[in-house]
Image: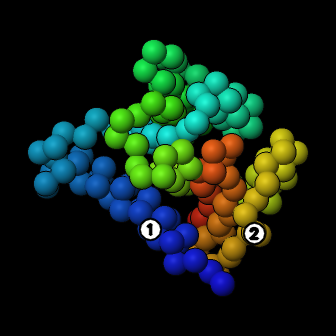
Amino acid sequence: MRSIFRPIAVVALAVAAAVFAEARTGGPAAAIGYGGALTCVLDVKDLSKSIDWYRDVLGFDLLYRMDDSGWAEMSTPVGRVNVGIASQRKTARPGGAGAAATLVFSVKDAEAARKALESRGVTFVGGIETFKDFVRLQTFLDPDGNHVMLYQDLRTQ
């Protein structure tokens, strides 16, 4: 059974792109003054373990680490999109590590991406879901149970 939340995640990305486009051209978002960058924050149990996993498995680069506050930030291959990793956040969502967010990254080839990640020990949750002429989706978990998704946009092919 297909989850309604997965296509919604892709739609959410489209909405975010529209908000940034609106910010550049005026409208309500212009008053907020978006800076054109995004940092997604994940709550984790073990800062060092998570830094290693995001670096070694997904290829992210460590920008900085602040052990006294349980925070690290990593750059992704997506321009001006970073991942913040927090192990001591006072504003963490109920449920803590693994309960906060879903990161969704575009890939050029769903099968190739899956094979590359499986070779690094990643276990996927189910198979690749295809929504004809729209998108292919697949989900896996980081060491803390945070969902990470990959999508291949079929509209550009």
Residue wearing tag 1: 11
- For the point 80% across and 60% down, which residue is it? 111
- Vertical arrangement, residue 70 with respect to residue 129, above or below: above
- Give residue 104's position: percent from left, percent from top: 55, 54
Tell me how many marks there are: 2
- Vertical arrangement, residue 82 with respect to residue 110, above or below: above
- Give residue 47's position: percent from left, percent from top: 59, 28
- Outermost residue on the right side: it is 119
Q: Amino acid at mark 1?
A: Val
Q: Quadrant of the C terminus?
A: bottom right
- For the point 74% across and 37% down, which residue is it? 57
Label placed on residue 126 = 2
- Which secondary structure lies at badge 2? strand
Q: Earlier in the sequence, mark 1 or mark 2?
A: 1
Q: Nearer the viewer, residue 51 or 150?
A: 51
- Which secondary structure lies at badge 1? helix
- Give residue 49's position: percent from left, percent from top: 68, 29
Q: Nearer the viewer, residue 101 or 10?
A: 101
- Outermost residue on the bottom side: it is 1
Please tell me in which quadrant of the rendered image residue 129 appears.
bottom right
Q: In this rendering, which labeled residue sits more in front, label 1 or label 2? A: 2
